[in-house]
Image (cartoon, helix red, strand yellow):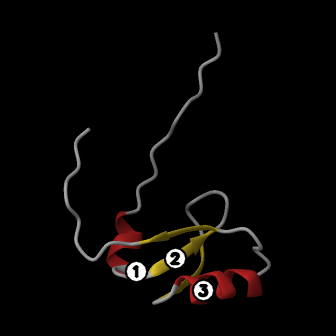
Amino acid sequence: MMYTSIMSIDWTKLVEKYKGKWIALESDEKTVVGSGTTLSEAIQQAKSKGVNKPVVTKIPTKIIPYIS
């Protein structure tokens, strides 16, 4: 049986800085290579820095607890 280790990443500083914006991250999911009010703006910035397949997400404007 094979187990996969999952590590959480603290995005607290990202939420403070990029609240309500789209961000593009390197594959480490920590390094921001683009941001903007639109998805295409964030991706374009990432591509201009040589990151052709960034990890993208939209940072919420409000943090709401989620329990599953």
Tag 1: amino acid? Tyr
Q: Quadrant of the N terminus?
A: top right
Mark 2 or mark 3: whose residue is earlier in sequence: 2
Tell me which residue sits at (65%, 16%) in the image.
2
**Who's the residue at 35% across and 81% down the image?**
20
Estimate the x, y position of residue 45 in percent, counting from the top left: 66, 87
Which of these two is toward me, 16 or 36?
36
Q: How many residues crowd around disc 2 within 10 Å: few (fewer than 14), some, or many (20 or more)?
A: many
**Disc 2 from disc 3: Cα separation:** 10 Å
* Residue drawn at 59 percent across, 90 percent down: 41
Q: Position of residue 47 (x, y in %)?
A: 74, 82
Kind of residue indicated by mark 2: Ile
Q: Secondary structure at mark 2?
A: strand
Q: What is the number of the mark on residue 18?
A: 1
N-terminal of the pair, mark 2 or mark 1, is 1
Find disc 2 in the rendering and name its residue: 23
Q: Is residue 44 left or right of residue 41?
A: right
What residue does disc 3 label? Answer: 40
State if disc 1 and disc 2 touch (CB < 8 Å): yes
Q: Amino acid at mark 3?
A: Ser
